[in-house]
Structures are given as structure tokens and as C-alpha cells.
Image (tube, helix red, strand yellow):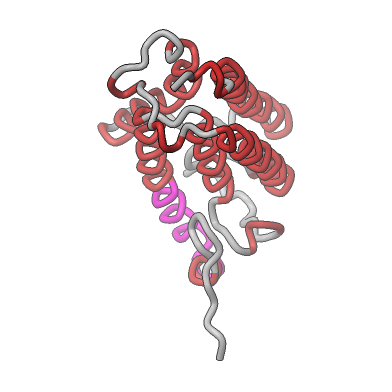
Amino acid sequence: MSYANGGLYLRETIVFISALIYWGGVLVNVYRVRGHIGKSPNLMKYRSLKEKLLFLGWFIVIAGWAGQPLIIGSYHVGFLSFINVLYIPLGLTIGFALALTGYAGTLWCYKTLGDSWRLGVDSKAKTVLVNQGIYRHVRHPIYLFQIIILIGMAWLLPTPFSIAILLIHFICISTMAMDEEAYLMKTHGSEYREYFFSTGRFIPKLKSRN
């Protein structure tokens, strides 16, 4: 198969730029919230073993997302070899559409959270419990939209490494989501407990019809 005929350069460019845009957007939001609340919303200290493993996981995800398209053109072997059955022309359209959906959803989340947005758990403060917009149905929609974007990236560059990035990312966000839920349960009590059981973690909860 000629990968060049499958728009490899365009795929590489989209994946690389998408990583810059996404994490650049995170930094912009950090500075925006910091300007409003007077302190950094980045609360991830990476002191315990779990936190250090999380740091390693996120490093692999971010570095892999941005770095894979820079080297894949020269190394089509092992973890960087394409899964041919998934390397199809339609994959370019699917990947791009999923990326746009993920970015739009992330901006929606930022707008809904406002100054309550944090990276990690702020154990010294009690933020407002946000349950409007998509948060009425999903407790961690930012993580959901990250998944959507990374699935899009896997369609653009369908390699075992892309799949590994997805799996590592899912472990990281699941760990962080459980920590955030434990903190919010402790902080907001029955209000959060009711919210917890009426929503899904990453996807909307199916409600039974009575």
C-alpha cells in the first residue's frame, strides 16, 4: 500500500497541529482562570507514587500525540506500523470530524464551567457544583471529548501506538475522575450524591422507563 496516496502528510499535519491546538487551549484556559481567581487552577503536584504514574501516563499521551506524526513517515515498523484495514480514505474524514467535535465540545465545557474549571482536585476550596449544560448528563465531559479527539487521531494514524495512547489515556482519566468524584462527594454531600447517581461518568446514563 502507498501511504502517500492515502494523504499521509495531511494526516500527520492534522494530528500534530491538533495536539498543539488542544494543549495550547488548556494553557490559555489556565491563565484565564488564574486571572479571575488569583491563583493557578493547575493543582496536580505529582508527589505520591500514584501521582507520579499519572504524570508518566499523561506525558506518554501528550508526547505521543504530538510526536508520532513527526516520526511515523520514516518508521513504519512495530508499534508505528499502520493497521492496514483501518488506513482507508474515509478515515481522514472521520478523524477530522471527530477532532472538530471534540474541540467544540471542550469549548462548551470550558464555557459551562467558567472559573470552576480545575486541573486536579482543589482540596482547600469549595467550588460551585456545576450541573448545567452537558454536565446535566455526564460528570466528566471534558474527558469524554478528549476520548473523541483521540479516537479521531487513531483514525488518522491507525497504528498500535495510537491504540496504546487511547488505552493509557483512559486509565489516566478514569483515575482522575474517581479522585474528583471522591472529593466532590465529600465536599458537596447529598447534593453531589444525587447528581452522581443520575449521571454517567463519561457517557450519559441510560434511564429506565417506568
Q: Nearer the viewer, residue 72 or 146?
A: 72
* Relative image position of residue 116 (x, y in whole percent): 64, 44
* In the image, farthest residue toward the top: 74
Q: Quadrant of residue 96?
A: top right
Against 24, residue 138 (above or below) is below
Q: Residue at x 48, y 27 (%)?
A: 157
Quadrant the C terminus occupies: bottom right
Quadrant where the N terminus is found in the figure: top left
Viewer-proximal residue, 115 or 57?
57
- Decide which of 146, 85 is in the foreground and name it: 85
Whether residue 116 is visible to the viewer of this picture, yes or no, is: yes
Q: Is residue 114 magenta?
A: no
Residue 65 vertical placement versus 130 (above, below): above
Residue 148 position by quadrant:
top right
Q: Main secondary structure of the magenta part?
A: helix
Q: Residue, x 47% and y 44% (percent of image)?
A: 123
User: Taking the image as drawn, is residue 115 in sight?
Assistant: no
Where are the magenta residues, as a range? 177-192
On the image, which quarter does residue 44 sit in? top left
Give the image location of residue 134, x and y in percent.
Answer: 66, 57
In the displayed structure, would residue 27 be above or below residue 184? above
**Outermost residue toward the front in this view:** 1
The x, y position of residue 113, in whole percent, is 68, 47
Look at 61% across and 49% down and name the residue there. Answer: 127
